[in-house]
Image (spheres, rainbow, N blue to C red):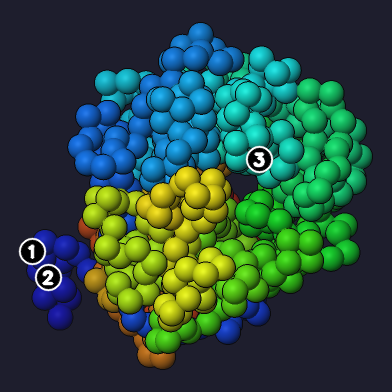
Amino acid sequence: MLMKLKLIVRFTFLSLFIVALCHAQVKQVPIGRVAAMADLPKPLQIIDWRAMALDFDRTIYDFKAKGEYWPMVWMDSTGKNFNQPTLGMYTAVGDVRQGPQNNKGMFHESLANMGSVLGATLVGLDKSKQGLNYVGMLKNYFNKDNGWNIMMNNTAPEVALLGGGYGRDWWYDVYPNVLFYAIYDKYPAEPEFEQMARSIAEQFYKADSILNGNYNYSYFDYGQMKPMTNQICAQPDAAAGHAYILYSAYKKFGDPRYLKGAISAMKALESQKINPTYELLMPFGAYLAARINAEQGTTFNTGKMLDWTFDGTAVCREGWGFLLGNWNGFDISGTVGSTVDHGGYAFLMNTFDAAWPLVPMVRYKTEYANAIGKWMLNAVNASRLFYPQYMPTAHQTIPNLAGVTKGVIAYEGFAKASTFDTLYQSLKAPVAQGDGPKWVPGKNPEVSQFSVYGSAHAGIFGGIVKETKVKGILGLDLLATDFYRQNAYPTYLFYNPYQSGKAILFTVPKGAKGKTDVYDAVAQRFVARNLAKGAKVVIPAQQSVVLVCVPAGKKLQVKNKQMLIDGVVVDYNYK
């Protein structure tokens, strides 16, 4: 028998270790909203998000693209903030405010431009070396001409009132800096990025000191260093964005002031009496609660921030959260937006971007592996429905115009009923649509419902998600968007949504040197040793595994309830 086993291992192309995993040692904590989502969403179809992101990049970044409303990019030569040309990208197809002939070519948004650079980078492209340096061009969004010295959604106040929240809607001023820090982690040698990153950190540290625990404002004037109130909701979840930027700066530069500022902002967030969710920063608060607790020994309430993120109980931004439901046979749960507007209105960009912090959070708080695995299955499955080629035409506002998308641009969102006052009222849920025509009433064309800015973020799913050979079991890369992390070994979450155990084939990541041991952070034990190629892993019904690939035969150490191998943390919650 022993000889037979040796022969099988020696001559089989892929060495298989069959591992039946017993029930998890790490007790899983449910997220109420996720528990109510479909176990196995229907219709089930997982598209290739990496291919979608690559196709988006190839198609959009083409200055010679043919077709009505194309190309989607142009060069802005106004030289705002830095004396260099920069890329303009349409927010929505055919937006009359945009393009080289309108507003001096200056009106373009960093949410689209930076999102596309980050998304492409996450699927393996180098955006600094594509004939042009699209990474360096992002510097023009660093608003030094107006004295704010942070990244903003536009390059200058001249176009501020055209749309996009510049200098008056807090999340629009904070989020470009969150995006920038992610991009800086991927392009640390880009000239002047360090200086910009330090300036941003200083501005946010000063702002947090002035706010002193009270983030109940509409926005913050980073030039005058004054909190401001206008007709827009107070946005206390801006504290999550502040904390993310400051903690990233601390991990990058080591300045203890930034850690102090991050913790101060997190305390301000946690102290809220009601759900402070506004747009898309709250998931970063949940991620930071888990991570800072794990790395710094704080005791932030991760569960509360996850409930705020998911529940749809926001007050001022009424109902903002994660959608739940099956609309005429389509499971739409897990998408992100308004849970109340016309019965629910989900947005593509918000759904993509929620995965960025929530997936890597599982590394630091393994008890949420099942919940995040189940949510991602629902969100990833439903998100194809934003794209006209995947949504039945009877559920689209303008299926006859879908050719303009070239297969890479999605509708901005979908709703339970058309959100237009008189148009598309006969369509049944879900209704794929977009707000573009409302931005410039009577002038923006119907095709402005197709969202370039949202579609630009597809690489977030593309960098995180792979489908296994078992339909419905996804492999989620927990390191893909865990920026400024400590040294880590490749780590993947697999969730089994079925009511019986399922076997997956887990392959050792490319580039592994020597043999690999595989540790499951949910079961808290090694499930395979000395692998050269891969292992067959059985995942129990509706359970998850978090598989960490560590170099075989290295020294194991337990320190402060953390398990390390060769000095690298493998399990942040070791018992």
Residues 192 and 554: in front is 192
Residue 191, how many percent across, how many down? 49, 14
- Which amino acid, mark 1? Phe
Is residue 386 among what the camera can see?
yes
Q: Are marks 1 and 2 in contact (CB under 8 Å)?
A: yes
Assign a secondary structure to mark 1: helix
Q: Foreground mark, 2 or 3? A: 3
570 vs 305, left or right, is: left
Residue 351, how many percent across, how many down? 51, 60
269 vs 105, left or right, is: right
Which residue is farthest top? 83
Is residue 477 among what the camera can see?
no
Assign a secondary structure to mark 3: loop
The image's mark for residue 11 is 1
Q: Quadrant of residue 313?
A: bottom right
The residue sitting at 40% across, 25% down in the picture is 100
The image's mark for residue 165 is 3
Residues 92 and 466: in front is 92
Assign a secondary structure to mark 2: helix
Say which residue label 2 marks: 8
- Residue 415, compared with residue 447, is above or below; it is below
Residue 128, how many percent across, how many down? 36, 24
For label 1, the crowd category at 10 Å Cα-Cα, with few meaning under 14, some 14 to 19 and many 20 or more, is few
For label 2, the crowd category at 10 Å Cα-Cα, with few meaning under 14, some 14 to 19 and many 20 or more, is few
Numbered label tally: 3
Q: CA distance from mark 2 to mark 3?
A: 63 Å
The residue sitting at 79% across, 53% down in the picture is 233
Q: CA distance from mark 1 to mark 2?
A: 5 Å
- Which amino acid, mark 3? Gly
Q: Does label 1 or label 3 sit earlier along the sequence?
A: 1
The residue sitting at 47% across, 58% down in the picture is 434
